Amino acid sequence: MVYPKGSDKTPTPNGASKEGWFKIYRSGNPLTFKWDANTSDNDTHKIYVTFESPGIYTMEVSGRSIGHAIDKFVLYQEAAYSKSEATEFPNFSKVGCK
């Protein structure tokens, strides 16, 4: 597990990260979709979030480069679903972006 630089937690990822933000990347053909997002250059870590209690949370996304695009993302409980179940689930909740 790694924490964004600037979050006052350690360890932090290799490469760019600051002010509580992760640099997130994926490898492979940029024209094909795949469920994959990582952080920490040359020391891959998946991206996770833990909510300690029920509530309303804010997720911020910022493009880091020209051509940045997000087609979709999924949040799911690891105790209830596998990654393949969550990403193939037919009833995604649609959330509008501000």
Image (tube, rainbow, N blue to C red):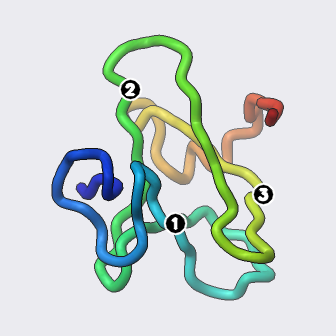
Q: Residue furthest left?
A: 10
Q: Earlier in the sequence, mark 2 or mark 1?
A: 1
> Residue 56: horizontal and vertical position, in percent?
55, 16
Q: Quadrant of residue 60?
A: top right
The disc labelled 3 sits on which kind of residue? Asp
Q: Quadrant of residue 27?
A: bottom right
Q: Position of residue 58 (x, y in %)?
A: 58, 29
Query: Mark 3 to mark 1: distance in Å?
Result: 14 Å
Identify the residue position indicated by label 1 in the image.
Answer: 24
Residue 71 is labelled as 3
Q: Nearer the viewer, residue 66 or 32?
A: 66
Mark 2 = which residue?
Answer: 51
Q: Residue at x 77, y 30 (%)?
A: 95
Element assignment for label 3? loop
Q: Quadrant of the C terminus?
A: top right
Circle 1 crowding by C-alpha within 10 Å: few under 14, some 14–19, many from 20: some
**Residue at 73% of width from left, 51% of height from top?**
72
Residue type of the residue flagged with mark 2: Phe
Of discs 3 and 1, which sits in the foreground?
Answer: 1
Q: Is residue 1 left or right of residue 59?
A: left
| Circle 1: residue type | Ile
Q: Which of pointers 2 and 1 indicates the residue nearer the eye?
A: 1
Asked whether disc 3 touches disc 1, contact meaning CB atoms under 8 Å apart, the reply is no
Q: Residue at x 17, y 54 (%)?
A: 10
